[in-house]
Image (tube, grey):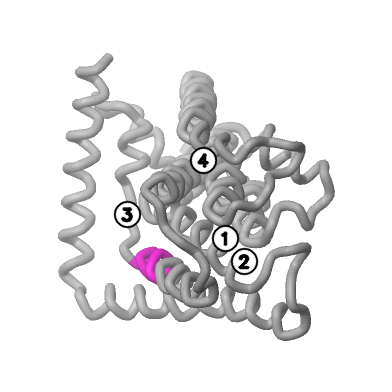
Amino acid sequence: MIENIANDLRLYKHFLVMLLRSQAQYKVNVVIDICSSFAVTSLEFVAVLVYFGRISSMLGWNVGEVAMLYSVMSISFGIAEMFGAGIDAFADTVRLGEFDRIMLRPVGSFMQVLGSDFRLRRLGRISQGCMTFVIALHLLPAFHWTVVKVVAMVIGIASGSIMFMSVLILGATLCFWTVETTELINILSYGGRDMLSYPLTIYHQLMQRFFLFVMPLAFGSFVPTCYLLGKPLPFGLPGEVVFAAPLLALAFAMVARITWQFGVRHYQSTGS
């Protein structure tokens, strides 16, 4: 099993190098794409600032604290978008009959799909998230770093990226039966991103339970941000639960991978 994982990682590295070289052939285009992505995603943060032009706080969260939450979400989602581009476009892969060709190759189908696309333009969202984080620190002069807080933030961003990629995998698996599931998955991926860019406590308890215990995307943004800021979590959860985020992300990823394998076994071709 370890040898298979190592082979998959080497294959993915090979795909990644090829994609980076191909995009590097058009350097100006890449720079324009990154800058345009940065500009568009920056408008999303402007919307956050507009809210606080009318109100001083959002259920106890000031503009600096919401900015920090937004930045953590933006960075983790940007990483998931960048590395999961091939999964995100899987509906087209199935609809055009390209997955039939993938199945004929003597390597794992999942790694081929994952390595089929890698979008450097997503660096625009990641850069915007980093800029927003700097702004958040400026708006929170009393905030102090510790080694534990740094670890909690890194854990949150990494776990959030894995969870969002897992959502994309679950959506891709549905394509084996429905072919087109873009809008359904967008509700969970882009919709989840937008919702969790704001404090989870502003939503109904059913939504809070969903994003904490069913699809634990909150462990990739809201929970680590609460730990950084010393804010209480819903339902009496201790702040230290943030360190369980990697385990939840791994469990969620395993569910997504098992679901993917089930879909591959029952794939019956598009007939094209």
244 horizontally vs 107: left or right:
right
Between marks 1 and 2, how big is the CA–CA gap?
Answer: 5 Å
Disc 4 + disc 1, Cβ < 8 Å:
no
- Magenta span includes 114: no
Of badges 4 and 1, nearer the viewer stands: 1
Between marks 4 and 3, how big is the CA–CA gap?
Answer: 18 Å
Between marks 4 and 1, how big is the CA–CA gap?
Answer: 17 Å
Disc 1 + disc 2, Cβ < 8 Å:
yes
Disc 4 + disc 3, Cβ < 8 Å:
no
Please indicate, yes or no, whether residue 128 appears anywhere in the rendered image. yes
Please provide the residue range marked out in magenta: 121-127
Between marks 2 and 3, how big is the CA–CA gap?
Answer: 30 Å
Q: Earlier in the sequence, mark 2 or mark 3?
A: 2
Residue that numbered label 1 is attached to: 69
Describe the element under mark 3 as helix, strand or loop: loop
Residue that numbered label 3 is attached to: 118
At label 3, the amino acid type is Phe
